[in-house]
Image (cartoon, grey):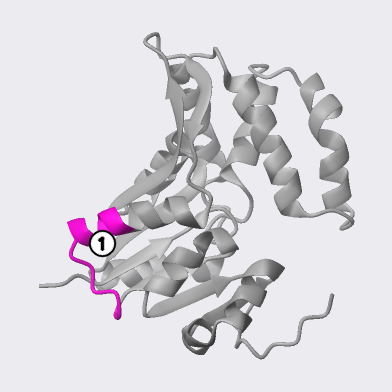
Amino acid sequence: MKNVAAFFDIDGTIFRNSLMIEHFQKLMNFEVIDPAIWYTKVKDVYLEWERRYGDFENYLEILAGVYLEELKGIDKAYVEFIAAHVIEVNGDMVYKYSRDQIDFHKKEGHKIFFISGSPDFLVSKMAEKYDVTEYRGSLYKVDAENKFTGELIRMWDSSSKQKVLDELIEKYNVDLEKSYAYGDTTGDLSMLKLMGNPVAINPNLPLVEAIKEDKDLSEKTSIILERKNVIYKVDHTVEILK
C-alpha cells in the first residue's frame, strides 16, 4: 500500500526566519563566535537587505560562509547545546498556515518530512519538536574529536534535495500524485514538481517566475501568502510588481 506524504522546507516555509541566522546570533551571544565578526563580515549585506536594496538570498549566502568558517574547530556538543536553546526559544516562530498544515497531515495519518538547507543539528531538533517522520539537513562534518572541520554536504539546492527525495520516496513507498510539498524558493522546485499537491508559501521572485513558466507546475500549485493575521491564496496569474 502506498503512503501519502508531506514534504516541508523549513526556513521561510515553516519558520519565519532562518534557523541558521537564529543560531548564529545565539553563538555570538554565548561568545562562541566573536560578535565583531558581524560588523566586519555580515552587517553591510544585512543592512542592504533590511533596507530592501539587497537580496535576502545574498545575505544568507554570505552569512552561511562566515558561519561555516567560524564553526571550524569548535566542539559539536557545545554547538548542539546552543542549537537546542534556539529551538526551545524560537521554535514556535512559525507561520500559522504551515503549523495548521502539519496538524492536518498528522490527523490524516500522512508521513511528514522536513528537508532543509539548515544545519542537520538544528533541523533534527525542529523535527523532534514537531514530531515528524524523518528529516534531512545540511551535514556539517566533524573530525575524530567531534570538532567541526569546515566541510559540509549541503541541502539547500534543488538537486541535493532531489537525491533525498528519491531515497525517502522509495523507502516509504510514497504516492506522488496524492502527496504534498511545501517550499518558498527554487531550492524546493524538485519537491514541488514531483508531488501532486505543491504549495508555495510566501515564495520569492525566482520561484514565482519558475512556477509561471512551467505550465504543468503552474496549474497545480497553490500560492499562499501570509501577512500579519491574514492568509491569502492566489494563483500563477498573480501580477508581480517589481
Q: Is residue 177 on the magenta stretch?
A: yes
Q: Nearer the viewer, residue 239 or 105?
A: 239
User: Which secondary structure lies at badge 1?
Assistant: helix
- What is the x, y in percent for residue 221? 50, 82
Q: Nearer the viewer, residue 41 or 12?
A: 41
- What is the x, y in percent for residue 188? 51, 62
In-image side of 69 versus 85 (left or right): right
Q: Nearer the viewer, residue 111 or 172?
A: 172
Residue that numbered label 1 is attached to: 169
Quarter the N terminus occupies: bottom left
* In the rendered image, the vertical position of residue 132 relative to residue 4, given as above or below: above
Q: Nearer the viewer, residue 221 or 126?
A: 221
What's under tag 1, amino acid-wise?
Ile
- What is the x, y in percent for residue 74? 54, 14
* In the rendered image, the vertical position of residue 159 relative to residue 228, given as above or below: above
**Residue 51, visible in the rendered structure:** yes
Magenta segment boundaries in residue numbering: 166-178
